[in-house]
Image (spheres, grey):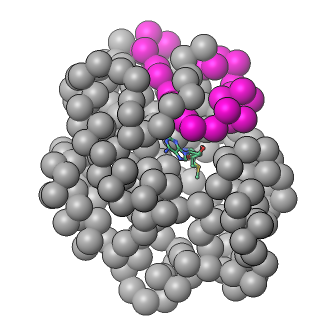
Amino acid sequence: MMEEINLLDTHPKTVRDYDKRGAEKTPEIVRLAKQFGKDFFDGDRKCGYGGYRYDGRWKSVVGRMRERYKLADNAAILDIGCGKGFMLNDFKELLPGATVAGIDVSEYAIGNAMPSVKPFLKIASAEKLPYPDKSFDLVISINSIHNLPLERLKTALREINRVCRGNSYITIDAWRNETERENLFKWVLTAETMMHTDDWKKLFAETGYKGDYWWFIAD
Ligand SMILES: C[S@@+](CC[C@H](N)C(=O)[O-])C[C@H]1O[C@@H](n2cnc3c(N)ncnc32)[C@H](O)[C@@H]1O
């Protein structure tokens, strides 16, 4: 499947004050955020999430993924940029027989991951996945691979294809018009690669990315 599809539209709508974030952003805040440590996840909102806590928002998303991708009870699922493993926890609840795996560059997130999935998580980067070819029925990456600069991001897209034997789903920072572009630049702390949605689609064609996709849009 290769479709532009929003599987996250059941998420609670986050209120974002783009001007405030843009005005508060300093090189020091960006430096701290890019470490993906405690400041980014559980520090001040200026530096990232301002408290990255489990709230069950992934339950409906994983239900939709199970249906869309016809996941078997024993499916193998990888989450790239899994953070504390919230989504994988919900997959494991929905499909107890599934094999779940997650990678993230953040030692802090993996160290503070949900105990239910912590044994299945590894510290690694999206551009070098520590798994053999065709290991997973579903590979997911939510708002994570845009943290790589362009060339390394291309490698990450190829890595998704390599480890995937079924479907994949990614979301990345993008815009469709000038207002969204301006808002995104005010908002982002960590992303290295952001593009117009049309340019992302060209990149998918260039790298041979074959999965579904959606956007983080600052509208
Ligand atoms: C915006 S958070 C999203 C976390 C999670 N996917 C979610 O939606 O709740 C971005 C995540 O990407 C991770 N990350 C950043 N660079 C990465 C890389 N090169 N490879 C894998 N994960 C990365 C960060 O540590 C962080 O957990």
For residue 47, say whether it is visible: yes
Horizontal and vertical percent position of residue 32 = 74, 57
User: Can you tell which quarter of the image residue 198 is in?
Assistant: bottom left
| Residue name at image x 36 percent, y 12 percent | 74
Horizontal and vertical percent position of residue 88 = 53, 28
Q: Is residue 142 above or below residue 151?
A: above
Horizontal and vertical percent position of residue 60 = 51, 41
Q: Is residue 15 above or below residue 160?
A: below
Return the residue nearer the eye: 100 or 41: 41
Return the residue nearer the eye: 193 or 97: 193
* Span shown in magenta: 95-118
Horizontal and vertical percent position of residue 119 = 60, 14
Return the residue nearer the eye: 196 or 156: 156
Q: Is residue 193 left or right of residue 24?
A: left
User: Can you tell which quarter of the image residue 215 is in?
Assistant: bottom left
Return the residue nearer the eye: 99 or 34: 34
Membership of 106 in magenta stretch: yes
| Residue name at image x 52 percent, y 62 percent | 191
Where on the image, by quarter, is ligand 1?
A: top right
Quarter holding the N terminus is top left
